[in-house]
Image (tube, coloured by chain):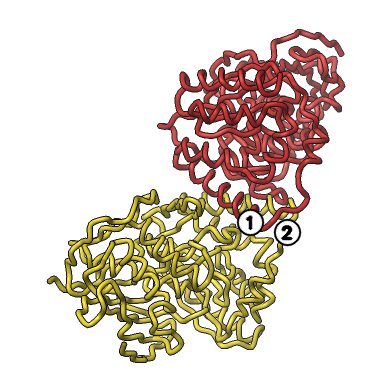
Chain colours: A red, B yellow
Amino acid sequence: MAICFQFQSPLKPINIPPSSTKKAPIFRCKASFSTTITTEPEPVFTSVKSFAPATVANLGPGFDFLGAAVDGLGDFVSVSLDTSVRPGHVSISEISGSSKLSSNPLFNCAGIAAIAAMKMLNIRSFGISLKLEKGLPLGSGLGSSAASAAAAAVAVNELFGAKLGADQLILAGLESEAKVSGYHADNIAPAVMGGFVLIKSYEPLELKPLIFPNNQELFFILVSPEFEAPTKKMRAALPAEIGMPQHVWNCSQAGALVASVLEGDVAGLGKALSSDKIVEPKRAPLIPGMEGVKKAAIETGAFGCTISGAGPTAVAVIDNEDKGKVIGEKMVEAFLKEGNLRSVSMVKRLDRVGARLVDSFPR
Amino acid sequence: MAICFQFQSPLKPINIPPSSTKKAPIFRCKASFSTTITTEPEPVFTSVKSFAPATVANLGPGFDFLGAAVDGLGDFVSVSLDTSVRPGHVSISEISGSSKLSSNPLFNCAGIAAIAAMKMLNIRSFGISLKLEKGLPLGSGLGSSAASAAAAAVAVNELFGAKLGADQLILAGLESEAKVSGYHADNIAPAVMGGFVLIKSYEPLELKPLIFPNNQELFFILVSPEFEAPTKKMRAALPAEIGMPQHVWNCSQAGALVASVLEGDVAGLGKALSSDKIVEPKRAPLIPGMEGVKKAAIETGAFGCTISGAGPTAVAVIDNEDKGKVIGEKMVEAFLKEGNLRSVSMVKRLDRVGARLVDSFPR
């Protein structure tokens, strides 16, 4: 099991090769959860490379059930048929972009998802080796583990002829998420499907893609400070009980958020995103400068701002890339001034595609 | 102040004359709350008659912020210039369809809303007399007070040339609702605007109409038992605090409900409507037979069922009128069998128009 540490700047923009049109997976199905494959499929390629995007989960009042995919930022996974690997097994041959990840596939997001996809496909005769290229920093609130898992599940699936649907790829990713960050689909679902995805239920897993209109522009301004969000504290900060007025308020804002997504109303989306009275007020004080960053974003013209996932990244929304850059600069300034934290900002479009094949080598 | 009690069967279907196209009020504006009229407008008619529809509020996880208007069921209000009434004042000359309502305009939903509209219009030189025809039973959970208030506000507005927008008509209605049943806009907003309306905020009042697609059919099955819902108990049954899992669940269902409305997905709408884990489980046991009625509705093919407003009416949804009638019969049977209550059922379309002028007599 060879391990190679190739350091990559976190948050470095990535140029993603266009997806192969021959084998474009259909990810836009509604989850219905058919049984796994009973006949072992033949591999279609000797190796493939996939990409899965970063994701912004929670989105203010969408806490724990809503997420969106971010274009041009994410992880790559390559998988190859490898006769030196025990049939039915996965070996991680290389990890680049992070020095903190285990190369034991049982303790690695990509490895766990790859194994889950192998099992779903009923692969018993082939072993594969996996190479993970992290484009996302760990623990930033941008769905790093979900991107690795989604890319791995998609890569394995494509290697064997894309027999699994989006629903099963998400379940494979969920196995990974459950072990790493909790049984939450609000990162893995948009990482696989692209766009906005609403998690309707877990038993059974039911997902509702929310299609943001194609003729509208939506940009996420992502500002990531050099700060490790205290995960336990972030979770502990959540109130166990919520008053009825706050519940009704957040519910109505969640409804307005969903409506704004479907209507392509970026201003409405931002306003709703910014309106959480339950989670953000408890978590923001744990990220130095976050309140000032939000204020700076909105004062500079962002339609709304909140914490991405469990933080520490701040996410704001706007409908214009240039405006987004100006807002991002002000947010970086505010992190430094109010929180004494250095940070980097990016302006990224909504990813409407999700995890995809980016390269393949036929047998 | 003459009072005439003309009894009308509650829930009797109403044939509504088509709205005048000459003076069709524009109710579909987004609330922005301009100032009231400073110059007193001249009356355009000597008398007008308006109609406002029944409304279904709460809609399961839409508790306290979502409502929808129901076609072909509601209240009529006629207003006339009356020189025997003190200028700037309103007199109730007749109430039919209910023996329980006060003819003192200060204690009558229609009266309060009419006075509020008069004030907004700055009417100081004309007195009006008002006739209220109740088509809705009181306390049934179908927005009876809101229908009276909406019809009255619209009638007064039309009499004086329709200077007020939907936002102001809703504020006039809210004055009435606040005195009668609490400061909630989830009945008055759809009663004025028609369709589904999401209440985004109260300060300032911000409303989001949710347009159900014109090419889709949506029927409400409304089953009203002979039972007076214990209003105080219904309110007291609401939990003061809500656990985080229930909050997240209801929020996600509210999001799914909103998406289903906008997408015209009646099955999804029904499922979301049926999914409330916070309010309905507490209130349903206070309405004898309600749980059995919901079960019967869903077993007979309804897409979902919940309590309309604070009850006791049960509301189910379906996409076909004939199926709706069969479901309604089963719900009536269940109310009798499980709750020992007699009830009547109706199958009604979504009202997409809202409160409207139905007759007018030019000066």
Is B41 located above or below residue B227 in the figure? Answer: above
- Does the CB distance between marks 2 and 1 fall below 8 Å? no
Is A89 located above or below residue A206 in the figure? Answer: above
Q: Amino acid at mark 1?
A: Pro
What is the number of callouts on the image? 2
Q: Which mark is residue A245?
A: 1
Q: Position of residue B76 (x, y in %)?
A: 33, 76
Residue A274 shown left or right of residue A202 in the figure: left
Is B54 located above or below residue B103 in the figure? Answer: above
Q: Residue at x 42, y 78 (%)?
A: B108
Callout 2 secondary element: strand
Residue B126 shown left or right of residue B7 in the figure: left
Q: Amino acid at mark 2?
A: Glu
Quadrant where the N terminus of chain A sits is top right
Q: Position of residue A327 (x, y in %)?
A: 53, 22
- The quadrant holding residue A9 is top right
Q: Which mark is residue A62?
A: none
Q: Which mark is residue B241?
A: 2
Residue B74 shown left or right of residue B122 in the figure: right
Q: Residue at x 67, y 23 (%)?
A: A338
Callout 1 secondary element: helix
Tags 2 and 1 on a common chain: no
